[in-house]
Amino acid sequence: MLARDPSPPPLPAEGPIIAIPARGNESYMALVWRRLKRSWTGMAGLWLVVLLLVMAVFAEFVAPMDPKATDVGFAPPQVPSFHDRDGNLVMRPRVYALADSADLDPVTFQPIVGPDYDHPRLLGFFVEGAPYRLFGLIPANRHFFASMDGLPVHFLGTDKFGRDVLSRAIHGSRVSLMIALTVVFIITVIGTTVGMVSGYFGGRFDVWMQRFVELVLAFPQLPLYLALTTLIPVTAPTNVFLAFVIIVMSALGWAQMSREVRGKTLALARIEYVRAAMAVGATDRRIIMQHIFPNVMSHVIVAVTLAIPTVVLLESFLGFLGFAVKPPLISWGLMLQDTATYSVIGTYPWILSPVGFVLVTVFALNALGDGLRDAVDPY
């Protein structure tokens, strides 16, 4: 009889150990952020949105001039240059004001207007300029980028009254974005609440609520906006007119959000954990707030980022038609009223500069919305 070998069998040869990074209990928002960082368009939109918000909040500091100060009307843009009169490269940027030269035009015999190379105006960061009150409280006179001698400089030219277009566009971003954010906030609150309640309870309440939503969606918005302009007198205070614009845009915009949230709620109300909560006797309020609302928020966040550029475009369009804020407030739509005639656009094309701000804002928010949509629902 063979004796059993008491020694244990040899262990297999150990291969290379692969370290798997442990992420722990990653929250849903951390997962969305990790997915968003993979989208370069979404991150570009996020950074542009942050820059736009910073520009709107610190508009007095970012703007190179006082938006109400007047100078030469329809002055052309002054482009920063890194060259002197001989074409040599210089380290500090500068602008050259336009001046009459000694040469005469051979046809009109008028002095030829050209850059004044003899008197360059140096540019710099954090220079002293027009005084202002930051947030309406803190007195200051420093500007982010302006002329070092304190004289006016117009990077995007001036309008018909000689006001700096760039400074007015920067200050106008505050009003335009404020209108857009306020309208979208009201639309989101009303639309989300109505959509969840209507989709959850269903029945006759849902039927009548959806008929009302369809009635709101059936309104032709543009003729309605034009008709509402006659309800407010021209002498009405600016805050009353601004509140009326926000109320009208909110009243006509919540229905689409409500319809989308209702569709999501109808699908969520049939999921097992919602039916289990109903079976154990959970109240309707608890089911809506604890089970349905968190799952709807992912769609709502994406819808908000896509609704803000729509409101920005609508405000600009209504401002061009005259149904917008009134002076002394400034908005991108109000600035576009100066482009009403073709002769002004053809002769002074820099008046269209607010369109560039609108396009950048719409692109940034749409890019952020697309990135969030892919991050929230990658499938």
Image (tube, grey):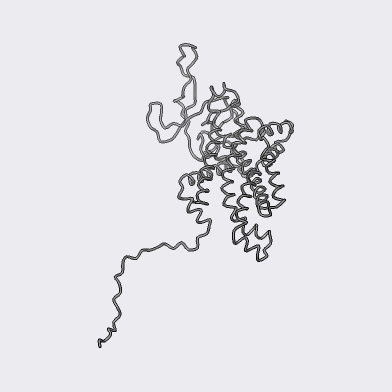
Q: Quadrant of the N terminus?
A: bottom left
335 to 310, vertically: above or below: above
Residue drawn at the location 53% of the way across and 42% of the way down: 366
- Is 285 situated left or right of 10 in this image? right
- Is 170 situated left or right of 252 in this image? left
State which quadrant residue 57 falls in: top right
Q: What percent of the width, then of the height, locates residue 146?
A: 51, 35
Residue drawn at the location 28% of the way across and 82% of the way down: 7
Q: What percent of the width, then of the height, locates residue 112?
A: 47, 17
Residue drawn at the location 30% of the way across and 74% of the way down: 11
State which quadrant residue 268 falls in: bottom right
Of all residues, the one furthest to the front in this rendering is: 1
Camera-nearest residue between 249 and 271: 271
Q: What percent of the width, then of the height, locates residue 287?
A: 65, 59
Of all residues, the one furthest to the left in this rendering is: 2
Counting every numbered tag in the picture gives 0
Of all residues, the one furthest to the bottom in this rendering is: 1
Camera-nearest residue between 282 and 143: 282
